[in-house]
Image (cartoon, rainbow, N blue to C red):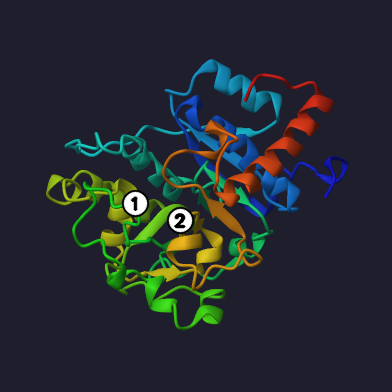
Amino acid sequence: MTVDEITTPPAAAQGKAWVTLITNTKYLPGLLTLEYSLRAVGSKYPLVALHTSTFPEEGHAALDARGIQKKEVEYLLPKVENDYSNDERFYDCWSKLQPFRLTEYSRVILLDSDMLVRQNMDELMTLPLDISGSSVFAAVHACVCNPMQKAHYPSTFVPSVCGFTSQHSTPDLAQTCGADPTYGLGMMNGGLVVVEPNQQLFDKIMQTIQDPEKTTNYAFADQSLLSDTFYGRWTSLSYKYNALKTLRWCHKEIWRDEEVKNVHYILSPKPWESKDSEDETHGWWWEVTDRRYEEEKITGTNDGF
C-alpha cells in the first residue's frame, strides 16, 4: 500500500476504536508507528491515545500534528503501591484498565504502544463476548517461559505450564485459537485486550485494585489483576494477534511469519531505540516507520518522533 492510499478512519466507526495508553514520550515513536500501521492495513477504526496528566506538551503537539485522537484518563494506582523497581513500566500499567470504563464506545481494543500491525484484524471488533458469562474480554495467553531468565520473575514461570508450549503439537490450530484460558497459570498478556466497556465490570476492577491483599501479589499489574479477577472467563485468542517477539524463537513450533497480524515488541531494547538489531522483527518495524517518515515529509511534520 502506498502513502497516497492510506486514509484516516472516521472519528468513531460504529462506536468502536483501538486505544493505547501513553504517559510519556518514551513510547511515542511506537505509538505513531502503531497508528500508521493500523491505517496502512486498512483498519476502519481509529486509534485513540489515552493519555494521563503526565503526558507532556511536546507529546500532545506530536499527536495533534498527525490528527491522532486523544482522551485523558486518570492515572490508576493500587491502594498500596507494589515495588516494581525491576520493571518500572508496571507502575503505568494499572492505567491500562481504564478502557473498561469507556462506555461511550460499544467496543474498544487496547493495544500496547510497542506493537506493529502487519495484517488487518478488524474482525476482533465483532468477536462475540459474554461479559456476564464466560467471556468477559478476549486476549492472548502470556508466555510464562521466562526465556530471558529474569531473576525477579516468579519461580512458577516455566515452559511446562505455558499455554504456547501446549500448542507445539498442534501448530495449525494455534493459528486460529489459543490454549484454554485456564491452562497452566491461566494468565493473559495485557498487550491486546478486546473490551466491551461496562461500568459494573470497571467497578469490580476498582474493587480489586483497592484490595492490598490481592494487588501486593500481582507481579504483572493489570494482566495479573484481570487474570485473577476473571479467572477462566476470557476468550483465548491465537498468538498471531499479540505475537510477542520472543515467541519467534521461544515457540518457533507455532510461529509463522505469514500468519502474524500484530507483533508485540516486549522487553528492551525497543525497535526505535536503535536501527542496529539482529532481531528480524525489528526490521519489520523500521520498514513501516520509514514509510511513516515519507508520509510525514509530505505533510511537513518533522518533530523528531
Please tell me whether mark 1 sits on a helix, a strand or a loop: loop
Q: Is residue 39 above or below residue 169?
A: above
Q: Is residue 14 left or right of residue 273?
A: right
Q: Residue at x 70, y 43 (%)?
A: 288
Residue 11 lies, in percent from the top left, at 69, 41
Circles 2, 1 touching at the beta carbon (< 8 Å): yes
Residue 145 lies, in percent from the top left, at 32, 62
| Quarter-of-image position of residue 90 | top left
Q: Quadrant of the C terminus?
A: top right
Q: Residue at x 51, y 58 (%)?
A: 242
Q: Residue at x 50, y 65 (%)?
A: 239
Q: Is residue 89 left or right of residue 125?
A: left
Which amino acid, mark 2?
Thr
Q: Nearer the viewer, residue 73 or 158?
A: 158
Q: Is residue 171 left or right of residue 153?
A: right
| Quarter-of-image position of residue 300 | top right
Residue 17 seen in this snapshot: no
Disc 2 to disc 1, C-alpha distance: 9 Å
Sort mark 1 into few (<14), some (14-19) or many (20+) by Cα contacts within 10 Å: few
Q: Nearer the viewer, residue 129 or 173?
A: 173
Please tell me whether mark 2 sits on a helix, a strand or a loop: loop
Residue 10 seen in this snapshot: yes
Q: Is residue 173 above or below residue 226?
A: below
Residue 246: which numbered mark, if any?
2
Which amino acid, mark 1?
Met
> Mark 1 — residue?
148
Q: Residue at x 43, y 23 (%)?
A: 53
